[in-house]
Amino acid sequence: MKVNSVDNTNFKALHVSPKTLEETHFTTQQLLSIPAIKNASDRFEVRCTSGKKKYNYRCFAVPLNELGKSLGRSVIVGVSTGALSTLLPETFISTYVHANELLMPFFSVGFGMVAGCCHAIADCIRLGYKRAPELNIQIGQDIGVKDNNFENSELLGHKSDNNIALRFIEETRGFRIYPDSSVIQNTCHNINIGEEEDFKKVLSNFDTDDLFNADNYLKLLKTLKEKCPHDKHLFEHKIDKMGNTMLTQFFDIPLTDKNSETYDKIIDILSKEPNLDFNQKGYMGISILEKIMISENEKALDFAKKYTIFDYYPELNDIYVNIQDKNFKEKIKNLNFKYSDLTRALQNKSGKAVERLMPYIEYSRLLNRTYIQKEVENVLYKMIKDNDFRVYFTNSYPQLIFNTKEGKAWRGVNKG
């Protein structure tokens, strides 16, 4: 979580000011604990503001300091009422104490206790309810902030038609979304449809089979940026039935002396895009890195490696050993990879899955053994709380943790 320059609590695309959180009794973590809101903020802009409508709700968890204050007030009311009871008209008092002066102190004390108890009961009922405004939720493609003032921000592009109300009911009973979470899900679905329709409308004016030409690609890219200015998923939409996206298609453009200038213009536009996924796969499941390695395109590699850690899979090693350019091959060798299949196998504590991956790890000329060992150590000793699996893994695959701190400690223990 971070606080941006206009003092808004901001997690990815969840926008809510500290003032709104205080008024509606929410925290950012509570909002993100609601799956529908978390998923919406992962993909779109979610703007939260205090609603005008207020409501009462039951609150059983009354703070001890408030209970203490309530008890103090009840005691004061009881004492004051008991003292004032002595000033009641004599005719009224005689009716209840039969003009017996000895009973007068008991009458005052009893009268005060009754008044104090009544006040305590009324105060507890009052503390058992709280009043808070609804939290209004709006979802849109993009957001614009005017004069650095979040309260004047405006959602742009496709957005929710109506405010979605969220009520803080009670910590022990959760939250309520009116009507329910499906409203948020349906809103996101409708925005997705709107994005796809806008994208396809632009695409219908171009020949997607002719995007291997850098000039044609640049023309389409500029048109998309102009016609879909608020779409942050331009490089995720499919551009053909083969599963290519605008991002995977770019790496199919051959770099030549003639198109070098156009190629640089494309890279300049792409470099300004946040959150590009360079682990995307296009036609036939061929990844972006595979395309770069096959073409031995050094300019494309220098561009892509600045923004990502690539997923490793065995096919990359087969391409790597056949690279002819020694300098390019060295650059590939120095890339940082994450072996997601191995990480998942460890997280699932699956010895069989690790065993299936071992040949690809042991015979790979591309994988960095030190990096793999650090990754294994991180999963085993920070993410998994199963000592039996750690012992099994270290006994079975010592080579995957040999030079790590934990591996050395383990060998020292076993030597003893």
Image: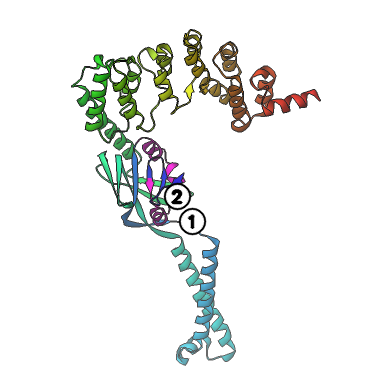
Which of these two is toward me, 29 or 317? 317
In this rendering, does residue 84 appear at all?
yes
Picture mark count: 2
Q: Position of residue 166 (x, y in %)?
A: 36, 48
Q: Position of residue 5 (x, y in %)?
A: 40, 49
Q: Amino acid at mark 1?
A: Phe
Q: Residue furthest left?
A: 205
Which SS does the magenta portion mostly show? helix
Which of these two is toward me, 343 or 52? 343
Element type at marker 2? loop
Left or right: residue 409 versus residue 352 is right
Q: Residue furthest right?
A: 416
- Distance from Cα at disc 2 to Cα at disc 1: 19 Å
Q: Residue at x 34, y 16 (%)?
A: 255
Q: Residue at x 47, y 92 (%)?
A: 90
- The residue carrying mark 1 is 60
Which of these two is toward me, 155 or 356? 155
Q: Position of residue 358 (x, y in %)?
A: 59, 14
Element type at marker 1? loop
Q: Position of residue 245 (x, y in %)?
A: 32, 21
Which of these two is toward me, 380 or 131? 380
Question: Is 222 in the magenta?
Answer: no
- Identify the coloring: rainbow
Q: Categorize mark 2 by other alpha carbons within 10 Å: few (<14), some (14-19), many (20+).
A: some
Q: Residue at x 36, y 18 (%)?
A: 251
Q: Amino acid at mark 2?
A: Thr
- The residue carrying mark 2 is 27
Region in magenta? 15-43
Left or right: residue 210 versus residue 350 is left
